[in-house]
Amino acid sequence: MARNVPEIPTASMADIAFMLLIFFLVATTMDVDSGLSRTLPPMPDETQQDDQQIRERNIFTVRVDRLDRLLVEGQIEDLRNLRDRAKMFIANPNDDPTMPEKEHQTIDYFGEVYIPRMAVVSLQNDRGTSYGMYIQVQNELTAAYNELRNEISRQQFGLLFDQLNPDQQAAVREYYPMRISEAEPRGGGR
């Protein structure tokens, strides 16, 4: 004699699956913050724009072509050297007349200092530049500023930049302001 197995009611299974789906959608957080954190300088007045022309010696030109070749100041350069070259340019420790002009400034916690105030790193990529190379160049340029900030923080306060209080960090940022200008990508690989 064969025994019939009773069926399991499945009418409410779809409702339960739907409720679990809603629960996980609501309870799950998704981090979508991606990109590079940059603080853009304020727009200059049109009358001031002509007065504040940046001289050629104040611009450190970095370009990546469509073949991911790095050109620094018009010459092919190895990515491993970019950070040190950028640090040398930004700080201009020897007051080299071919590097950024230096000015006397008064900065909290530092007093009067003689530093480059108009040093700008100009970054330009071709449209064919790979995203990986673009990020590597960005990382090296940002690391140059971070290392300079850490060096001056250790020298002045005996701490790394991240360990300083907000006022001290603001003073170090004024000492070495991060000025990375990104030009519109070019279409070709000239």
Image (cartoon, grey):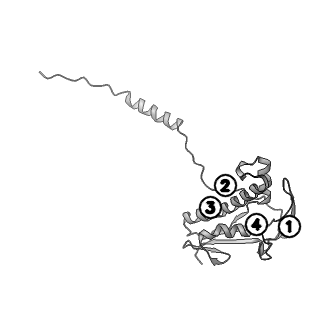
Q: Marks 4 and 2: in contact by CB < 8 Å? A: no
Look at the numbered disc 1 and give the secondary structure of its residue: strand
Q: CA distance from mark 1 to mark 2?
A: 28 Å
The quadrant in which residue 102 appears is: bottom right
- Residue nearest the observer in this picture, 80 or 133: 80
Please report whichever mark, 4 or 1, sits nearer to the chain's N-terminal start.
4
The quadrant in which residue 90 appears is: bottom right
Q: CA distance from mark 4 to mark 1?
A: 12 Å
Please report whichever mark, 2 or 4, sits nearer to the chain's N-terminal start.
2
Query: 10 Å neighbourhood of mark 1: few (<14), some, or many (≥20)?
Result: few
Q: Give the side of residue 168 with respect to residue 190, left or right.
A: right
Read off the residue under disc 3. 139
Residue 46 image offset from top left, x and y in percent: 83, 65
At 79% across and 55% down in the image, what residue appears?
156
11 above or below 134? above
The quadrant in which residue 44 appears is: bottom right
Please report whichever mark, 3 or 1, sits nearer to the chain's N-terminal start.
1
Indicate the quadrant containing the N terminus: top left, top right, bottom left or bottom right: top left
- Residue nearest the observer in this picture, 27 or 171: 171
At 77% across and 69% down in the image, what residue appears?
93
Q: Amino acid at mark 2?
A: Ser
Q: Amino acid at mark 4?
A: Ala
Q: Amino acid at mark 3?
A: Asn
Q: CA distance from mark 2 to mark 3?
A: 11 Å
Query: 10 Å neighbourhood of mark 4: few (<14), some, or many (≥20)?
Result: many
Please report whichever mark, 1 or 2, sits nearer to the chain's N-terminal start.
2
Residue 187 image offset from top left, x and y in percent: 59, 72
Read off the residue under disc 1. 103
Read off the residue under disc 2. 37
Read off the residue under disc 4. 91
